[in-house]
Amino acid sequence: HPSMLMAVEKDGKIIEDEIVEISRIPYSGEVYDLEVDNLHNYLAGGIVVHNSIYRWRGADYRNVQRFEKDFPGCQVVMLEQNYRSKQTILDAAMSVIDRNPRRKRKQLFTELGTGEKISYYEAGDDYGESAFVVDTIAQLVASRQYEPGDCAVMYRTNAMSRLLEEAFLQARLPYRLVGAQRFYGRREVKDMIAFLRLVHNPADEISLDRVINIPPRGIGDKTILALHTAARQADSSPGAILLDLARGSDSPFFGLFAGRAALPLADFGGLFSAWRGLVTTYTVTELFDRIAADINYKDHLDDGTEEGKERWENVLELRRVAEEYATRTLAEFLENVALVSDQDTIKEGNVPTLLTLHAAKGLEFGVVFIVGLDDGILPHSRSFDEPEEMEEERRLFYVGITRAKERLYLLRAERRGGRGYAEETIPSRFLDDIPANLLLGKSRTGRSSSRRASLETWTLPSPQGAKPAPILQAKFHAGSRVKHSIWGEGIVLDSKMQDGDEIVDVVFESVGIKRLAASLANLTIVK
C-alpha cells in the first residue's frame, strides 16, 4: 500500500524504495520465485516481496479473488489436510475465521486425532491471568508432560508482555521473547524511566544525557559536551547547571554557551525545575502524566503507524506500574523498576516463548496460551468501526489458534489496569464464535451478560468546592467519535443520564474502554 517501504532490485543491488501508488496492469510472462532463507521473502519481477497474510504488511485477500476472475479456466486446489494440530483446535479456528464474509471456506481436517478440549480461563485480573500461565507451564513441565520449550504465550500487543515477564521472573523461570525487546528494555520505556530518575536525582548524568534532547529540542552533542565541561569547571553536575539555567540570562552559566545554544538548555531547565518542585506533592502517576504532557511525548511517539501506536501503548503500560505507587514514593517506584529491569532474557534454549500474534506466523508449539481475550484488546479497539480491520483481527486470532499442536489455552481477565485501579472488561466477541462443546471452563455468564457495571475514570478533579453544573440532556450518542485531551480520539459505546450528569462509555484507540463523567472529562465531538 502507499507509503510502504519496499526492497527493490536495481542494477544488481537491493535498494529501499517507497510505494507512491498502486495500479494493476496486464502482464503475461514468468514470475521468479527465489526464496530468501529465514525471511519468507521472494523476488517477483525485480521486487523483493514478503510472503505475508497481514494487511498492514501489504497482503490483500482480493488478489486471490481477482486471480480466479482473470484466469477463469484455472483450477482451485483446496489444501485442507492439516499436519500440525488436533481436530478440536482446527474446529475452533474454523469457527472463528469462517465469520469473515469474503473468505473462501475450507474444511480443515487432520489424521492426528480429536485431542483435548480447549481450556478457557477467566482470571479475576490481569495479574491472575499471568500467574495462571506461569503456574500451568510449571505444572506441565513438572509432570513431564511437556518440555518448557514446547510452550508459547501469545498476546495482541507488545505492551502486554510486561506482566507476563514479571510473572516469569517472580517464579524464577527463564523465558525468551521473539521479535521484541524485553519490556523494560524498550526505548520509550527507558526514556520515561530516565526522565523520572533525573527528576529524583539531578546528578544522574546517564539519565540526563539520554533525555535532554527527547523529543528533539535543538540540543546537539556539542552543546551537551559544553554542559558537562561547565559542570566540571564549576565543580558541579550537569543537572545542577540545568536547574540554574532555568533562570535564563540571570544565570551565571548562561553566557558560557555559544550562540543560541543556551536557549534550549534554559527551556529544558525550566521544565526540569518545575518537575523537581512537584516531587513532594505529586503522586508518581501525576508526575508521570505531567512529564509526558509537557514534552508532548504521545505526539512524538505515535506517528500513525502500527509501530508508533505500540510505542505509546508501552508508555501507557509503564503508567499502569506507576499507578500502583499511589501511596508510595518516587524512590520506591524507581527501586522496583531497577530490580525488574535488571533481569535478562535468553535467546535460545529449552524455555517458554513469549511473542505477539503478529510474530507467530510460521511457528508451532505443543502448548499455546493466548491471553487478553477482551474486547478492545483482541479484537483491538481500532477495528471496532472498520469491517476490514475486524476481519484482520479474526485472521490474527486464527493464526494464534493454529500455532497449537496439542493443547490450547484461551485466557481473559475480568479486570485490567493495575492493582487498586482496575477496570472491568468485556469478553472478546470472538469467544462467542467458538462452540461451547469445544471449550473446557466456559464462562457461566457468557459475553452478553458480562457488560461491566463500573469502569475506571481518569479525569481531573473539580476545583475545591466547585460543583459542575448539572447536565439535563444527553450530548453524546453511541457511534459518535469524540476526543479526550489525554487519550485522543475514541468511539462512544453507550451514554446514559445519572445523578445530573451524562455517563459515557468510550473506547479509545490508545487505552481501550473507559467510563467518563461528561461534566469532568471535557470530551469534544469530532465532526
Image: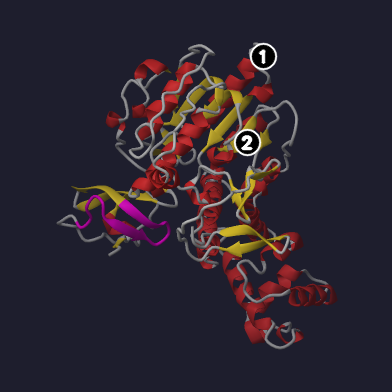
Question: Which residue is at the front of the view, 310 or 52?
Answer: 52
- Residue placed under numbered mark 2 in the picture: 165
- Looking at the image, tell me whether mark 2 or mark 1 is earlier in sequence order: 1
Residue 370 left/right relative to 224: left
In this rendering, is residue 41 above or below 10? above
Residue depicted at 77% across the width and 68% down the height: 237
Residue depicted at 55% across the width and 64% down the height: 300
- Identity of the amino acid at label 1? Ala
Whether residue 183 is visible: no
- Residue 142, disc: 1
In this rendering, is residue 488 above or below 215? above
**Which residue ends up furthest to the left in the rendered image?**
472
Q: Is residue 86 magenta?
A: no
Q: Give yes or no for contact between labels 2 and 1 (Cβ–Cβ under 8 Å).
A: no
Mark 2 is surrounded, within 10 Å at the Cα level, by few (under 14), some (14 to 19) or many (20 or more) other residues, namely: many
Q: Secondary structure at mark 1?
A: helix
In this rendering, is residue 275 above or below 104? below
- Identity of the amino acid at label 2? Glu
Q: Over which residues does the magenta segment extend?
A: 475-491
